[in-house]
Amino acid sequence: MLVNMRELLGVAERGHFAVPAFNISDYAMFNGIIDISEQKSAPVIIEIHPNELKHIGTDVVAGMVRRAESSTVPVVIHLDHGASFANVMVAIRAGFTSVMIDASGLPFEENVAACQKVVEAAHAAISYASCSDDGDPRRSEVPDGDEWHYVPSARVRNVSVEGELGNIGTTEVDKAFDQVIHYTQPDEAVRFVAETGIDCLAVAIGTCHGLYPKGYVPQLRLDLLRTIKQALADADLDCRLVLHGGSNNPDDEIAEAARIGITKINISSDIKAAYYQEMRRVLENQALREPNEIEPSCIKAMQAVAAQKIDLFGCAGKAALYR
């Protein structure tokens, strides 16, 4: 079942669980994540960064869309950290059902303007299909009052938008470890959501991208998360909260963040580390050369990590809530 982020996370919000957003870099990883999500009966977000999209190419997205449409669990195909309007439009045209525009490094007003532009384009991404059945329930969904026989298709429907306010740190190997975090401020979060119309807000509450150096123990500002959540509720703003840098954090803090109100948690480094550590072990046998001999155990190693995250976030078995 292919859905957008607003549809997916609305159920998670009401059910007090979070959906994992797994970054994948090739089609084998994609299939592995869909397979384990189906085994766990868990909704899932397939997340692809612009650099990953350049690596695999946009043509492969059509295959992902077909697999998602026939899946037994709800699936979102999401652009992670789109850095420009061009990045976003490439993803929308390729078939993504959700996009992120990350202008968090810009001044507040410029971040707002970038998100407003993307929201206008993404929310207008509705394609129509003719239908002769006057009992079709989709008629009422036509936003512009057009003729009754035009209905939104299941292919592209109101692409959802994620923005980011504040900045989390990074542990990327080509950069110095920067644990300086610009925490999201509740009053700014209210203003940002109200002015942009975004569907999801990525907040900075203490995480970093990547795997933490040995000996460093991150601490999430769960008190700040509660305050942001309450501020948005008090302002009657309908926006889901997202946590980036979900890899390598203490399980109890991540689980509590999901219970408080985080509905999407990004996982990239954890599953890739498992995948490629196993691949390095397998490739010690230099006689191997066929991907179908090399990759199966790598996929299983990745799936073991993904399954643990699905359970931790309270997501296992929740696909039934979407039927």
Image (spheres, rainbow, N blue to C red):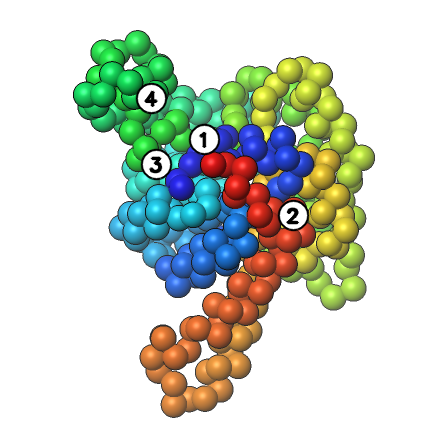
What label does residue 220 carry, if any? none
> From what the image shows, is residue 14 above or below residue 279?
above
- The earlier-in-sequence mark between 1 and 3 is 3
Residue position for label 1 = 160
Identify which residue is drawn at 61% across, 19% down: 237
Residue position for label 3 = 92
Q: Helix or strand or loop: what does disc 3 sit on? A: helix
- The earlier-in-sequence mark between 2 and 3 is 3
> From what the image shows, is residue 156 above or below residue 41?
above
Neighbor class of circle 4 (other Cα within 10 Å; few <14, some 14-19, many 20+) is some
Identify which residue is drawn at 45% across, 58% down: 35
Number of numbered discs on residues? 4
Kind of residue sitting beneath label 4: Arg
Q: Judge by depth and name the residue closer to the eye, 17 or 29.
A: 17
- Tag in front: 2 or 3: 2
Q: Tell me the distance, in whole angstroms, between the alpha carbons under discs 3 and 4.
A: 22 Å
Kind of residue sitting beneath label 3: Ile
Q: Tell me the distance, in whole angstroms, between the alpha carbons under discs 4 and 1.
A: 19 Å
- The earlier-in-sequence mark between 3 and 4 is 3
Q: Tell me the distance, in whole angstroms, between the alpha carbons under discs 1 and 2.
A: 22 Å
315 vs 92, left or right, is right
Neighbor class of circle 2 (other Cα within 10 Å; few <14, some 14-19, many 20+) is many
Does the residue at mark 1 contact the one at mark 3 (Cβ under 8 Å)? no
What label does residue 138 carry, if any? 4
Give coordinates of residue 184: x percent, y percent: 69, 32
- Tag in front: 1 or 2: 2
Q: Tell me the distance, in whole angstroms, between the alpha carbons under discs 2 and 4.
A: 33 Å
Q: Tell me the distance, in whole angstroms, between the alpha carbons under discs 1 and 3.
A: 10 Å
Q: Tell me the distance, in whole angstroms, between the alpha carbons under discs 2 and 3.
A: 28 Å
**The image quarter in which residue 212 lies:** bottom right
